[in-house]
Amino acid sequence: MKHKKLFWIFAILQYTLLGTILFLIFHSLSEIHGERIIGLDTQLFLCIAFPLFSLLVKYISLTKT
């Protein structure tokens, strides 16, 4: 039980940071290019969906062992 709580605490922090880094990378690429590379809705979707999917995969792999 204790390991699951630790997993959720650190996994949520890790994947929140990953989403933030992705958002900042897309934002800086848009600033360098001078206009938006991708739309804001696509950018937000990628910054939320990719870390969430990674979290799900990691959780499934840890529960199988």
Image: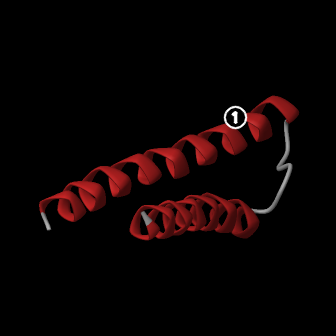
Describe the element under mark 1 as helix, strand or loop. Answer: helix
User: Which one is nearer the viewer's eye here, 46 or 27?
Assistant: 46
Name the residue rendered at 62%, 68% in the picture.
Answer: 49
Left/right of residue 62 with respect to residue 22 in the rendered view: left
Point out residue 37 in the picture as x, y percentages from the top left corner. 86, 49
Image point (67%, 38%), residue name? 25
**At 61% across and 58% down in the image, what residue appears?**
47
Q: Is residue 14 left or right of residue 36?
A: left
Give residue 39's position: percent from left, percent from top. 79, 62
Q: Residue furthest left?
A: 2
Amino acid at circle 1: Ser
Determine which quarter of the picture holds residue 21.
top right
Which residue is farthest top? 32
Q: On the rendered image, what quadrant is the C terminus found in?
A: bottom left
Query: In the image as oriented, which residue stretches furthest toward the front?
Result: 65
Q: Could you tell me residue 31's position as x and y percent?
A: 75, 35
Q: Position of residue 23 (x, y in %)?
A: 61, 48
Name the residue beneath numbered marker 1: 28
Position of residue 17 relative to residue 63, above or below, is: above
Instruction: Decide which of 4, 25 is in the foreground and name it.
Output: 4
